[in-house]
Image (cartoon, rainbow, N blue to C red):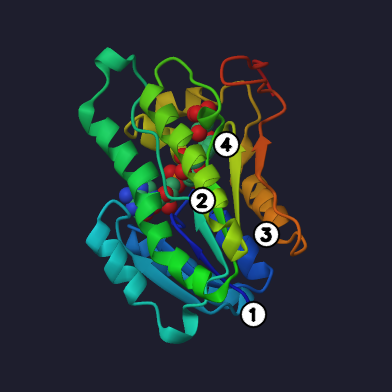
Amino acid sequence: MKTALITGTTSGFGKAIALRLAKLGYRLIITGRRKERLDELTDRLKAEYSTEVIPLCFDVRDKEACKDAIASIPENFRNIDVLVNNAGLAAGAAPFDESLEDDFERMIDTNIKGLLYITKLIVPGMIERQSGHIVNISSISGIEVYPNGSVYCATKHAVNAITKGLRIDLVKHNIKVSSISPGMVETEFALVRYHNDEEKAKAVYKGIVPLNADDIAETLEFIVTRPTHVNIIDIQINPTQQANTYITNRKQEI
Ligand code: NDP
Ligand code: 8X3
């Protein structure tokens, strides 16, 4: 039985990925800050898939909390085959000069430093076992830069550099490193980005059928179910109506 650790499972991609991997027979370590949602998902995974689940409630920006959480994983659960670095966010969408420093810090601390803290804690076990697969959730914004998104784009460019660097450094240990680079996916992402302004969040997907979280989970399933000799480097995935970060085919009614 394989074990996966997924960060950010209280919503969006992470939750959909947990449900997909449970269906595939994985046992899971799921994380997030919202305890109630983590507990709800734990109950659901156990009830629907008889999955063994360890919920870990902590903030990936807190290095000591990351260490404590990973150290608390029971001995018989420590052979982590798949690490999905998913926890992340965009905070704000404004020209650089009007952006908030607090937003910069939230994005950099979560999307880059949080990913590094968790990866640093999980990689030694993978090296010891000479096997493992790390899948980093990147973004179209790791490939392009768009107006009002410089720092979020910078964090996902960093995720891509880290992904490539990890692949180079870990290839000798038989560890696969992959990424997924989605365009617009309707989750809580836009709500978080616009500081809980529901109107602004809704407008992001106006006239578009966006991807949904399970489209990303399905992509991840493809990546982690390839044969041992195959490593998927990156999968870019957009809604049909999105050509790139600034050209979309919006319809008034869909
Ligand atoms: P959601 O807001 O729906 O989910 C984000 C998840 O990350 C939540 O479970 C949240 O849990 C967790 N998270 C955020 N900050 C922290 C933190 N400091 N510590 C621990 N967990 C945290 O967004 P998505 O599912 O859309 O986003 C998932 C990933 O996908 C992100 O990395 C995002 O950048 C990326 N992405 C999203 C796209 C989109 O259009 N939706 C497109 C491309 C990439 P909690 O709040 O409980 O801690
Ligand atoms: C999220 C997708 O287009 O808002 O990573 O950058 S986008």
Report if the CB atoms under discs 1 and 3 are less than 8 Å apart. no
Front: mark 2 or 4: 2
The picture quadrant where one finds residue 154 is top left
What's the residue type where badge 3 is placed?
Val
* Element at label 2: helix
Report if the CB atoms under discs 2 and 4 are less than 8 Å apart. no
Measured from the top left, where is residue 104 in percent x and y?
A: 28, 31
Report if the CB atoms under discs 4 and 1 are less than 8 Å apart. no
Front: mark 1 or 2: 2
In the rendered structure, which disc, 2 or 4, sits on the residue that comes first in sequence?
Answer: 2
Check the image and report above or below for 225 versus 184.
Answer: below
The picture quadrant where one finds residue 222 is bottom right
Residue occupied by mark 2: 166
User: How far is disc 3 from disc 2 in space, using C-alphas?
Assistant: 17 Å
- Direction bottom: furthest residue: 76
User: How far is disc 4 from disc 1 in space, using C-alphas?
Assistant: 31 Å
User: How far is disc 4 from disc 3 in space, using C-alphas?
Assistant: 21 Å
Task: Give the number of the disc on residue 185.
Answer: 4
Classify mark 3: residues with Cα within 10 Å, few (<14), some (14-19) or many (20+): many
